[in-house]
Image (cartoon, coloured by chain):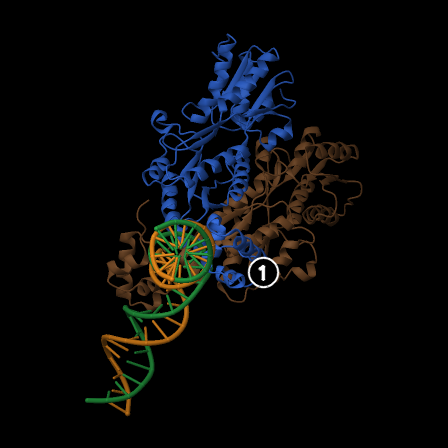
Chain colours: A blue, B brown, C orange, D green
Amino acid sequence: MADKVTITDVARAAGVSRQTVSNTLNSPEVVREETRRHVLDVIARLGYRANQAARQMRTGRSRLIAIRIDPGGDGINGSVLDRFLHGLTESAARAGYRILLYTAHDDRSEIATFEDLIASYEPDAFVLTATHHDDLRTSWLLERRVPFVAFGRPWSDLRDHVARHPWVDVDGAAGTEAATRRLLAAGHRRVGFIGWPPGSGVGDDRRAGWERTLAEHGLRPDGLHRAGEDGVATGESAALDLLDAGATALVCASDSLALGALNVAGPGVAVTGFDDTPVAGAVGLTSVHQPLGDAAAACVALLTRALDSAAPPATHVLLPPSLTVRRSA
Amino acid sequence: MADKVTITDVARAAGVSRQTVSNTLNSPEVVREETRRHVLDVIARLGYRANQAARQMRTGRSRLIAIRIDPGGDGINGSVLDRFLHGLTESAARAGYRILLYTAHDDRSEIATFEDLIASYEPDAFVLTATHHDDLRTSWLLERRVPFVAFGRPWSDLRDHVARHPWVDVDGAAGTEAATRRLLAAGHRRVGFIGWPPGSGVGDDRRAGWERTLAEHGLRPDGLHRAGEDGVATGESAALDLLDAGATALVCASDSLALGALNVAGPGVAVTGFDDTPVAGAVGLTSVHQPLGDAAAACVALLTRALDSAAPPATHVLLPPSLTVRRSA
DNA sequence: CCCGGCAATTTGAACGATCAAATCATGCCT
DNA sequence: AGGCATGATTTGATCGTTCAAATTGCCGGG
């Protein structure tokens, strides 16, 4: 490792004081134009970079954003977080932040990790994923005034929380609406929906998009809806069931379910999935695509805004998904 | 955020000096048993945790391990890195380290990121993924004596590099060997292989396992091998080709290829994939499973050993994969 | 000619931890 | 009883940066 270049080295080489070098970088407006240029020259020549630990000690800012990484996931949907994480790392880097990972099994252990991280690494903010009903994490963070943004709407206490903390989400209902609309436009009249048991915010939202679109077209959803645990098996059985009930097209809450449906559906049956995972591309499944890169960028934007201004206005961003059309529908 | 507890707070509360508190944590053997217990008590009571930035300034150790995160990936295999990353985060945490992410487009920009990170965050080590022929990164890191471990063997200059830096890898040849063996045991005699164009270390390795297993059984590989870019399309065309050539079973270098093969193969044809991605589980594809959690743990083990001892002995770990058997073979 | 005011720059202190060296306490040996 | 090794604890210095206050240089006005 090359010897590190400190701010004192730069100061000496440029014939100015430490503070002037610091000012050139952090408050350029107070430094005389000529000096500023000279110092920047020397900085470039020596390849100086401010040491983060030292800066952090003085300013209290680590320029670190922490996020939990989940195990590969139940399956097909695993890669969603992966893509989000990549986008987050890129957007954060552009804003001068780095991403720190941690794991946790449940809310409780995640909160323990919060305490640990905050005391030792002092991340400037957290990004929460997989928010759910009665999320202990959000209230814990809010109480302690730790900056954070949730990727996923707060599903409980909507009235209270909607304005309490920043969040970014993809409009699932709009996604299933687009899918349903497309099927109706293709002439289908009995469009079924395969989802998850009621109670999960995300699942209910996706179902709502399908249901309201049917309603808009004067169609009734009765008997065209099945639910079960996420997975190919559920998709298969639910699809068989719905086809029996006369469905000619199926909107699914996930690619896993859609893949199952695809397995048992004849060639005439249209199937759409959700998440546009790699599998969808592989098997030619039309699927709702989430703009994960944009979502990540929005998260970083909200965080930097909150970190820069003293009074962080809780804001939210709801992004529209798009429909990636393939052979299946 | 609760007021932070510093080592001085603990010292005051315990009626000892800063250094004694520091010693209780870092060199317990020099502290009298009674004092040690008392101090630990106070530490627990106040919830003290050493501030990482301050420690880093003095010791030069950040307890950070940096790794690149790739974009979701070309497709189905994307989740491999995801699972590895999760394992890495867990193993690292157990060893007292955290994972820092970064992105890069190519070797050159990754090296630029090395410089940036080393100067600012000072990660203690790097984990390299997707090592390839003539990898610029390894030589750069070796020259500067930056500790790192590669997940993936160094494919170029094997003689030189094999002992030059630590690496962890999964024995791809052993994986295809197991798959091939199983097919032969089931009575197949014409077992084909679908892989990638020669030149990629990983691909050549996987093919070698298939080829040597045929040889062991006195069978010739001639005409039973096809190659192309990774993807479902390649899998389909190559499979059609090989079935024409009389193959009754197919070993594939990836799940993407295998999925393609599965699309065109009749029910009697056995197909095996590689990586055991979620898709494999979803479509019932027998696939070679990489022990990614173990690989991650091995990486952390090698790194901590290198970081703890002054003379880092370059070591390597080659892990055996397992075969996850499903309907397809 | 001196002084106030302002812009530009420098100096000293501090963040919280650990290292290295100094101090204090204790018991043992001669 | 005094010296000395050994163990336990404390003190001072330091890592690299930024904040806050002090200093310097310069100009114009009274």
Residue A51 in view of the camera = no
Residue B208 in view of the camera = yes
Q: Is residue B127 left or right of residue D27?
A: right
Position in image of residue A26 (x %, y %) = 47, 50
Q: Secondary structure at mark 1?
A: loop
Judging depth in this view, the residue of A266 and B327 nearest the camera is: A266
Counting every numbered tag in the picture gives: 1
Of the 4 image quadrants, the one containing the N terminus of chain A is bottom right
> Which chain contains the residue that carries disc 1?
B
Q: Is residue B254 left or right of residue A115?
A: right
- Which quarter of the picture shows residue A293? top right
At 48% from the left edge and 9% from the top edge, which residue is drawn?
A220
Q: Amino acid at mark 1?
A: Thr
Position in image of residue C26 (x %, y %) = 23, 76
Position in image of residue B317 (x %, y %) = 58, 56
Of the 4 image quadrants, the one containing the C terminus of chain A is top right
At 63% from the left edge and 44% from the top edge, which residue is drawn?
B105
Judging depth in this view, the residue of B248 and B225 nearest the camera is: B225
Question: From what the image shows, is residue A3 above or below residue A204?
Answer: below
Around disc 1, counting alpha carbons within 10 Å, would you say few (fewer than 14), some (14 to 19), or many (20 or more)? some
Judging depth in this view, the residue of A12 and B152 nearest the camera is: A12
Position in image of residue A242 (x %, y %) = 53, 16
Question: From what the image shows, is residue A214 above or below residue A123?
Answer: above
Q: Is residue A54 left or right of residue A83?
A: left
Q: Which residue is mark 1?
A: B315
